[in-house]
Image (cartoon, rainbow, N blue to C red):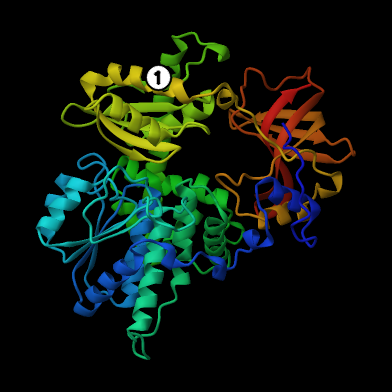
Amino acid sequence: MARPRVDDSHLSDKLHPVIRQIYASRGVNSDEQIDNRANTLHDFRLFKDIEIAADILSDSLQRQDKVLIVGDFDADGATSTATLMQGLGMFGFSQLDYLVPDRFNFGYGLSVELAEHIVAMAPDLVITVDSGISCLKGIERVKAAGIKVIVTDHHLQGEQLPNADAIVNPNRHDCTFPSKSIAGVGVAFYVLIALRHTLRERRYFNEQRPEPNLANLLDLVALGTVADVVALDANNRTLVHQGLARIRSGKTRPGIEALVDVARRTQARLSASDFGFALAPRLNAAGRLDDMSLGIACLLSPDINHARRIAGELDMLNAERKEIEQGMQQEAQAALAKLSLTSAQTPDALCLYQSDWHQGVIGILAGRLKEHYHRPTAIFAAGDNGLLKGSCRSIDGVHMRDVLAHIDGQYPGLIAKFGGHAMAAGLSIEEARFNEFQQAFAQEIGKVLTEEAKECILLTDGELPSDCLNMEFAELLRQSGPFGQHFPEPIFEHTFELLQQRVVGDKHLKLVLRHSSGRVLDAIAFNVDVRAWPDTQVRYVHLAYQLDINEFRGQFSLQLIVRELQKQ
């Protein structure tokens, strides 16, 4: 369905009219919101506690304290850890180390078990990244040992804040930082900006200790921001744009260069979607199946050959992850097929558990089922000590963390622990109480899920003028990003004459189409139902598509990427 046309007269008439309408329809209400220069970023001082954190770090630097960064096992956590490791090193910290909780032994965040491990390491200062806001007991244990703690996080706070020395989180209730959707890596980057400001005031920098260029870290910030699927508001778009620009110009670290190579992407033409669909899955594979330290080692590697070896390992882990995921998806689909559901009978919520499912892959499976059925989904796998680890994914209109909070309030003790965002959350429950949770989950979702939210409607940007069906406009579209979560890629629609069709790679459909203007175009539809295609009876198809430039063996050509395919 085409988006309604909106007034775009408030945007510069120097913009291409199609681009101007795309921006306006996505809520851009001033030219400043599409100005991606670094000086448009929000002021760091808007973060609660950030100047306290900078003072603590500055004092630690003067004493050359032993600093431990406690990360997380996803791509945001990995890039956050690498950002602080590199950034603090640039300022002159010499005793830096990091620790990532093993998904399978410690679970998420600074748990009490991990706290004991940290206390044994005896750091002077602990900094959490992409975690910490819900780790009250673990932080209390670390503080009791006389260790200072700075929390940097972006997850939603609970009823109580941890007893840390500083808590830098845009989603704490008393924080005025405008971008509530900034990723963990973005928060870590802002802490470094604040530290630089404090050290300037203390006259720390001189000829022997020059001020570091923090822009060198923006490739990490961009990757982590897109990988965490946070909303690309104006501030996040600027961070991603700046990081992409550095990568495209060759100013990136060996680890990211190696990931780009192993994903068979072209560095000079990298897009935000390449972060999400090519680089992040390989980085995440380490935390899902093995140890995220491998991913962080890749990002921190100073040598391209060493980085390529690690990237090769990550690529193999990602291939293994795909196999595991495919098996789990087939099992989940089989379980749902037994219910013989029609689209009208799809339940309000999906909640599944199988004892042999891999807990590192349940988040992906939850996302896949959520996309397929367009329903809030919770997937569980066996954990330790009789607990199940769960991963939830939601749709617009259902705030997943609020759902879990309501269940926790109504059924005290049913959920052992939980945390997350509106669209994604994690939790632990007792295995013996899975059925009880399943019922509570369905009941709570049923209260908030509206009929409108159940409808899965693909919004397009309407018909693209025929004079825009060319490489020049496709490149202009690419440069108009970054696009991503809550700032979607432009999608157009049209009814084409179908000239040729064939299946490639077992499940993809290559098409040759004729536009009503007479222009002949290539298109590809991924993951089609091969029982329905090819269909020689079909002469016309209505497409929702993205305009793309295909690169093959150094040659570039215009290609439509099909998002929706309807026989006419």
Number of numbered discs visible in the structure rendering: 1
Q: Nearer the viewer, residue 21 or 29?
A: 29
Q: Give the x, y percent position of residue 303.
A: 38, 67
Looking at the picture, does residue 106 appear above or below residue 513? below
Q: Nearer the viewer, residue 521 or 14?
A: 14
Quarter placement of the C terminus: top right
Outermost right residue: 517
Residue at image point 62% right, 44% down: 488
Looking at the picture, does residue 421 appear above or below residue 533? below
Q: Is residue 145 left or right of residue 410?
A: left
Looking at the picture, does residue 318 appear above or below residue 406? below
Q: Give the x, y percent position of residue 436.
A: 28, 17
Q: Nearer the viewer, residue 162 or 304?
A: 162
Q: Give the x, y percent position of residue 360.
A: 33, 37
Q: Give the x, y percent position of residue 332.
A: 41, 20
Question: Identity of the amino acid at label 1?
Answer: Ala
Outermost bottom residue: 207
Residue at image point 47% right, 64% down: 218
Label 1: which residue?
442
Dot 1, crowdedness within 10 Å: few (<14), some or many (≥20)?
Answer: some
Residue at image point 59% right, 25% down: 452
Q: Secondary structure at mark 1?
A: helix
Quarter placement of the N terminus: top right
Q: Is residue 295 left or right of residue 485?
A: left
Whether residue 527 can be seen here: yes
Whether residue 304 can be seen here: no
